[in-house]
Image: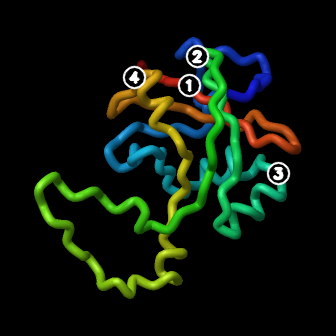
Amino acid sequence: MASFVTQGSVSNGNEGNEAWPFRIKLTTDCMRWDSLKITPSKEFEEFILGHINESSRKALESWNPVNILIYDVDTCETYDAKLSKKESFWFNPMPVIGEKPTMREPHSYGLKKAREEYAYSIEPFRYIIRKRDLKYDQEIGFRFSGGRVIVGLEFSVLNP
């Protein structure tokens, strides 16, 4: 794991919305395989993407993943991850075991349509889910904490 210097913030669970401007309630929709799905939103654009460096922003706009560091302020651990912009079909629900998948649309889904309907993804995220024993309906918070070169996010479980 890479080392990461935080800005001296410590979470005690009683901080206001300002402390964690981007929040996600963990659901079956956002916890996928080994990734955390982030639906594009004003908050994500403003408080996370609005602070990353220009080269990282251009990489995401070009559909290239960006290396990030996630610092868990509750455990003081740092995780290497990637922030990606992915076409919506990457996040289609998994079929129930034993059922054959059904095609909602023909294979000619179309790159243009896929690129209009997208989400962001942080991966790998499964290790953090297991290590922190995260469950559905918990809320987690992110805030930007990087610099000019490193894209860093601080992370905390807001309601354990």
Q: Residue 40 appears at what percent x and percent y?
A: 54, 57
Q: Are dots 3 and 2 in contact, CB under 8 Å?
A: no
Tag 4–tag 1 contact (CB < 8 Å): no
Which residue has dot 3 on it? Answer: 53
In the picture provided, is 114 more to the left or to the right than 46?
A: left
Identify residue type, mark 1: Ser
Task: Say what amino acid the circle numbered 2 marks.
Answer: Asp
The outermost residue toward the left is 98
Task: Choose top left, top right, bottom left or bottom right for residue 126.
Answer: top left
- SS state under label 1: strand
**Which image quadrant is residue 75 in?**
top right
Whether residue 86 is situated above or below residue 24 in the rendered picture: below
Q: 17 or 62, which is in the foreground?
A: 62
Residue 65 has which mark? none
| Dot 3 amino acid type | Asn
Mark on residue 74? Answer: 2
- The residue pinned by badge 4 equals 133
The mark that comes first in sequence, 1 or 3, is: 3
Q: Quadrant of the N terminus?
A: top right
Image quadrant where residue 68 sits: top right
Secondary structure type for disc 4:
loop
In primary-sequence order, the first of circles 4 and 1 is: 4
**Quarter of the figure that contains the C terminus:** top left
- Residue at coordinates 62% horizontally, 41% vertically from top-left? 81
In the image: residue 11, left or right of residue 134: right
Residue 18 visible to the viewer: no
